[in-house]
Image (spheres, grey):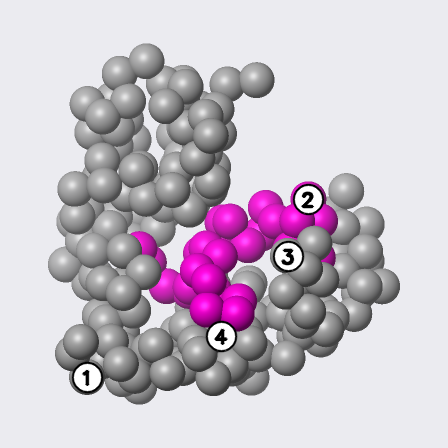
Amino acid sequence: MSDVTTRIQDLIDSNDVVLFMKGTKEMPQCGFSSRVAGVLNYMAVPYEGINVLSDADIRQGIKDFSDWPTIPQLYVKGEFVGGCDIITEMTLSGELDQLLSKKGVTFDQAAADKIREANA
Amino acid sequence: MAMEAHDIEALLRVSFPDARITITDLAGDGNHYAAEVIDESFRGLNRVQQQRAVYAALKGKMDGPAGELHALALTTKAPD
C-alpha cells in the first residue's frame, strides 16, 4: 500500500464518521461540501472533517481509494456511503438515520426530522 | 471548458442506450448540471454502484480542475 492509502485507511479506521471535504467543518469552501457538513453539523453527528484542499496527496488519493471522482465523500465505520447527492437523498428519505443507528453512531433524531419537515 | 447538455446525454447514451436520461442546466452557465438516469441495469445495485457506473460513462470529464464538467448532480435509479 502506498503512504497515502495507509493514511486514508488509518483515518477511516480510527474515526467512526469521516467526511473528506473542501474546507473545514466550520468553514466549508465548496457548496457540495457545505451541504453535507451542514447536515452532519445540524444532526449533531460526531465526525472528523478532513480538508482535502490542505493536502494534495489526500485530495487525489481519496478519489482513487473510493473509486469516486468527486468531493465530498462520507465514510461511516470504514464504509463509503456516498457523495453529496447520495447523502442528500438519504437524509431526506430517512436512510441516513437508519444507517447511523445501525452502525451505532449517535445523532439528534429531532433535528433529522426537522430537516425532512423543512424539505417536505 | 463547458459542456452542452446534449453532449452529456450523448456520452451517457453510449453506456446506457435504453435509459431515461434527463439533463438540467442548473445555472444556465454550461457548468452546473443535474442528470437523472433511470436504467434497468441499476436494478439490484446500491446508489454508490449506480453512480460509479455513471461516472465511468463520463470517462473522466468530472476529474479535477482539468475536467470539463465542474458540477453534475446525479440521481440514479432503476425503473419503477
Image-based side of B2 in relation to A83, left or right: left
Disc ID at residue B37: none
Mark yes or no: residue A91 visible.
Answer: no
In this rendering, the label closer to the viewer, 4 or 1: 1
Rendered location of residue A61, percent (x, y): 23, 71
A87 magenta-colored: yes
Q: Position of residue A42 (x, y in %)?
A: 70, 71
Q: Which three-letter amino acid code belongs to the residue tagged 2?
A: Ser
Q: Tell me the SS state at disc 4.
A: strand
Residue in the image at 24% along x and 50% along y: B62
Nearer-N-terminus badge (3/2): 2
Residue A18: mark in rendering = 4
Q: Is residue A49 magenta?
A: no
**Sequence-wise, which precedes: disc 1 or disc 2?**
1
Mark sitting on residue A3: 1
Left or right: B14 as drawn, with respect to B45: left
Q: Residue furthest top?
A: B18
Residue A93 - label:
2
Same subunit under labels 3 and 2?
yes
Q: Nearer the viewer, mark 4 or mark 3?
A: 3
Tag 4 near tag 1, CB within 8 Å: no
Give me the disc on residue A99.
3
Q: Report the amino acid beneath label 3.
A: Leu
Relative to residue A53, is residue B60 depicted above or below? above
Determine crowd level at label 4: few under 14, some 14-19, many 20+ residues with C-alpha closer than 10 A.
many
- Give me the C-alpha separation between circle 1 and circle 3: 30 Å
Give the amino acid at mark 4.
Val
* Chain letter for the residue marked with disc 4 in the picture: A
- Residue range corresponding to the magenta coloring: A68-97
The three-letter amino acid code for the residue at tag 1 is: Asp
Q: Is residue B55 visible?
A: yes
